[in-house]
Image (cartoon, rainbow, N blue to C red):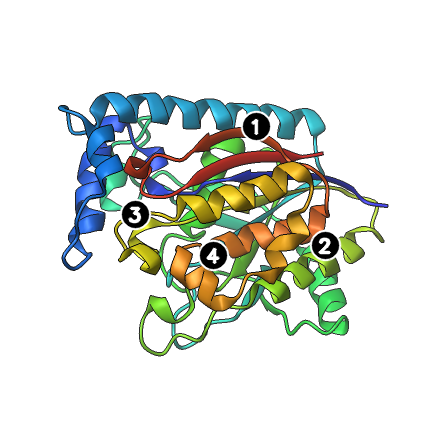
Amino acid sequence: MAEILGLGCSHAPMILNPAEQWPEIRRRIYGGVPNYQAPVKMVEELGDDNGLSHDRVNQQKIVDAFAVLKEKLHAWNPDLVIVVGDDQAENFKRDNLPTFCLYTGDEVDGYPFHRPGGKINIWDQPQDKKYTFKTPGTFATDMVNFLILEGFDMSSATELKGWDWGLPHAHINPLMFLNQECQLPVLPLFVNCYGEEAGPGYPPRPTANRCYELGQAIRKFLDGRAERVAIVASSSWSHSFLTHRYNCSEFDEEFDRRTLGWLKEGKGSNVAQFTPEEIRLSGDHEFLNWIITLGVVGDKPAEIVETLDEQSQVSFKVFAIWE
């Protein structure tokens, strides 16, 4: 049997920024929502300082939660870390957009602070700072081959050429908290979570059930290997600006709290039942990354390190560990 450690976290770009920048990030996000009306709960949270006091507390919660995950990860000392994240039209665009893709090169670069808001970050790193991670190319190729023979039409990539910044933010952002020193080999798994909402010409996202089945197949592969493997589910859950149930103005707290209960109870396989319409209405597109991870770790209770459920967060954020 494989030795597996599971971690769950957020990759929201704002988590790399000091709290003083969060109000501007919210302004830009909701500026793109037609007829946006801030929910009453968010107005109350923002108070009379536009959320600064609130944001400082929440930023510290995020930093502290990642510190717990990092300590667990490095103490466990895996041979490699699989990071399950979505590429949001960064490397994979309409001309070549796989549903699932594994990186099979021997190293990969990332520039987490390249974006306009990255000039100011909590580590005070330069905007062009590059991080290079070793990647287990032979292991990844073996996994691709196994999954194809198991009936999954997996894609693979030995290089990332879609843009100049390497790893997408879904992968590089959590690595800044978990593996910034590039000590641990990293295996990126890419998932088309946004589907048609990425724009015209983009195919639908995979179903929840198919993502869970992929996680189970990955576990079957790992059970035939000797490596110690950590797997990281990288995403926030419901995103307010994508939650059609509430006119893209607030995230679906009720939906996510039900899901959180399943994880605490060791009933993660229940998430495979979500329909595409449920995921679209709730703004939980990126939760597909967690569903794959849940397929790998199986129905075991999660240790919930932190939950950030305030509407000023823009998305419902959960930090979890499966041992």
Location of residue 40 (image quadrant): top left
Give the residue at x 61% y 44%.
262
- The reply to whether residue 181 is visible in this rendering is no
Tell me the element at label 1.
helix
Badge 4: how crowded within 10 Å, few (<14), some, or many (20+)?
many
Which residue carries the number 1 mark? 70
Which residue carries the number 3 mark? 250
Sooner in the amino-acid sequence: mark 1 or mark 3: 1
- Please say if 102 is above or below 152: above
Query: How far apart are the two marked residues, 2 and 1, measured between alpha carbons?
Result: 23 Å
Sooner in the amino-acid sequence: mark 4 or mark 1: 1
Sooner in the amino-acid sequence: mark 2 or mark 3: 2
Q: Which is in the foreground here, disc 4 or disc 3?
A: 3
Location of residue 39 (image quadrant): top left
Task: Specify the amino acid type for callout 3.
Answer: Glu
Give the residue at x 51% y 24%.
67
Give the residue at x 85% y 53%.
224
Which residue carries the number 2 mark? 139
Task: Specify the amino acid type for callout 4.
Answer: Asp
Query: How far apart are the two marked residues, 1 and 3, measured between alpha carbons?
Result: 30 Å
**Rendering coords of residue 301 (x, y %):** 69, 37
